Image (tube, grey):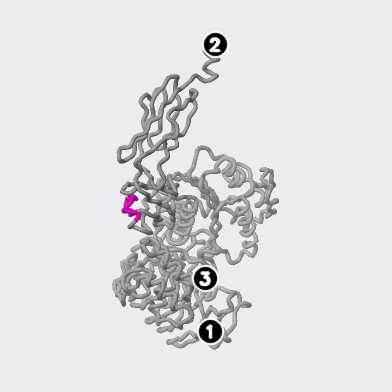
Amino acid sequence: MRNFKKTLSFLLSTVIIVSSVAGVGTTVFAATDEHTYKNFKYRILDDNTAEICGYTGKEAVVTVPDCIDSKPVTSIGRTAFYSGKIKEVTIPNTVKNIKWWAFYGCESLEKINLNFGLKTVGYGAFMNCKNLKSVSIPMSVTQICDDSFAVSCSTKKGVFDTYSKQTISTQQYSTDSSFTLEGYSGTVAEKYCNDNSLNFVSSGNVIYGDVNNNGTVDAADAKLAKSLIDTVPTEEELTAADVDDDGKITENDVNLILQAVGNEFYAQLFPCAKAMYSAPDYLSGRTMYCDGDSVAYGSGTNTMGNSTYSFCNYVAEKYNMTMTNKATPGTTLAIRKDFIGTDHRSILERVREMKGSYDVILLDGGFNDLFKNVEMGAMTDINNKSGKYNEYTTAGALESICYFLDKNYKDSIKLFVLCHNCSTRIKQSQYWSLIKNILDKWEIPYVDLSEETELTDDNEEITTQYFRYNATTKKGDGIHPLAYANMKIYGPIVAEKLNETVQSKSELVLPKSDISMGLFESYILNSEITELRGDIDVSYSSSNPSVASVDENGNIVATGIGDAVITISTSDGKTKNVNVNVKFLAMAVSFGKNKISLSEGNSSLLNLSVADGEATCSTTYSSTDPTVASVDENSGKITANKTGKTTVSCTTANGVTVRCLVYVTSSALTKMQKA
């Protein structure tokens, strides 16, 4: 599972629904997946390592084993220690991941001993551990998800919820002023505290890529990293050099460090620093059309501040977008013969009614097809884009949606959201696989919450906390995420994926990739980033400043004879190079001809030539009579406008001028019209 980036600040006082009934589930996995070792339940992962998925012991002080059945323990699974009575736990250095809600509700827990080697602390990992007052974070940790240390929680019972019309319980999360994280400045530990207004105590400083610890990332760091390959580095060396975050130092780390030398943005884009990186805004101010089922429509309660809040609302608010949301609860992707009227039209039928232009189209769907046993159907041949499909099946309806969008909204940014996992729906993976195959066929991006998150419905207390309350079962329904879940889980993931989708379409565009300059000339390198709506930083660097220097605004100055490469880098990871060749400044220039003849309406490009060993890049073109023939002042392109003659001149930066006489004659069409 790919952990999502933390993008929201901690909500200081947010109300969420929970059941007054304690949760009963303690593990995620089916019994057939579990094995027992002493008081631990575990399962074997695909990489042949072990994951702890339950604890049945009564000891107050627990040490997680580092190896079971000759397999290293690399993960603490989802809700593994849920509501445990432990007071102290030690996690071995073999563990890389502590997953979602792993220690949720361990109210007696007072001390956690984490070791170097840990990479990720999952969402809500230590949520509602009320007696936990401080944690020391190893420098190896590169991801701390939202609410990982939401330890302070108070419950109020007997609250009447006007949305569900039920008396329920609420929980309020607030910052525990006595809670402290000890960690390293420059890492996610410091960022988590800053984002959530928690106390932070620094154990030192980390600069990723700065292997020799001199305060900068330079070629010496790459050399030192290379020497550490196949050795046993210190924790400090491994943390600084393992910039691709795979747990070891390799040639790939060396190459990444070299790319960051002289490039202020590359270090921010190291994989190990991804959780601290905020991508540029590509969506600000755009228009967005949303459609789908009740998950896109929104759930919530009045105590949450909005009774119909969904991930669509989150995206629109985050990027200040104008949203049209046509999502309707209970609707399927496929057309259903047993529904009559407009209230239960399919998602397909509503999408086909779209009018106007939209920058972004955000859809979800499939849950109701699954719940109502709509015929799945099958994807047609990869080359079948005829628009003729069986729209009474999920597959046919989705293909019809894709066909419509391809024909009518080809340039719009599109994203399809596949919802979280419902543990009781055994066919969900089949539906989701079919949907993704169709979206791949039509090249429509998607985000699958069943893979991106561990949000599901197998733990009663957590399910009630994150999903709409069901008065009959007296717990969360496991289907409709509440506003809190949309603000903390659904929304950030969808927003990030949508922004990444636009970013992948954007380009860094330069007017030239090769420039010939005369000595002491200057040239302004104007660059453009397509699709960008928000601010972005751009940096410039020269491989040989003694030949061509460049300032922070892209102004190149030819300082010596020779060659140099100007590198343009953006804070979202785009890079382009411009080759600069500097020669002596041209003292004589020519067009190769002193007169030309053009017919009205035609154009011609004057090619400027200079002597061998000379060059110029600063030229200005002009025409004595633009009504006869105009000329582009930068490129020298002449356009014949009417019969007559004019003189086109080109002047270099040092005052050398060359001229060409231009005759404009009548075109054949003009002659016919006159006749």
Type of the residue with mark 2: Ala
Quick one: label 1, few (<14), some, or many (20+) residues within 10 Å? many
- Mark 3 lies on a secondary structure that is loop
Answer above or below: position of 218 versus 522: below
Q: Can residue 495 be seen in this view?
A: yes
Residue numbers of the magenta segment: 547-560
Given contact means CB atoms under 8 Å apart, are the residues at marks 1 and 2 in contact? no
* Front in this rendered view, residue 74 or 113: 74
Q: Can residue 188 be seen in this view?
A: no
Does the magenta run of residues contain 554? yes
In the picture, measured across the screen, residue 419 lies left or right of residue 612, that is right
Would you name the residue on which mark 3 appears?
A: 459
Would you name the residue on which mark 2 appears?
A: 675
Of the numbered discs 3 and 2, the one sitting upstream in the chain is: 3
Of the numbered discs 1 and 2, the one sitting upstream in the chain is: 1
Residue at 59% of width from left, 56% of height from top?
A: 367
The quadrant in which residue 301 appears is bottom left
Would you name the residue on which mark 1 appears?
A: 40
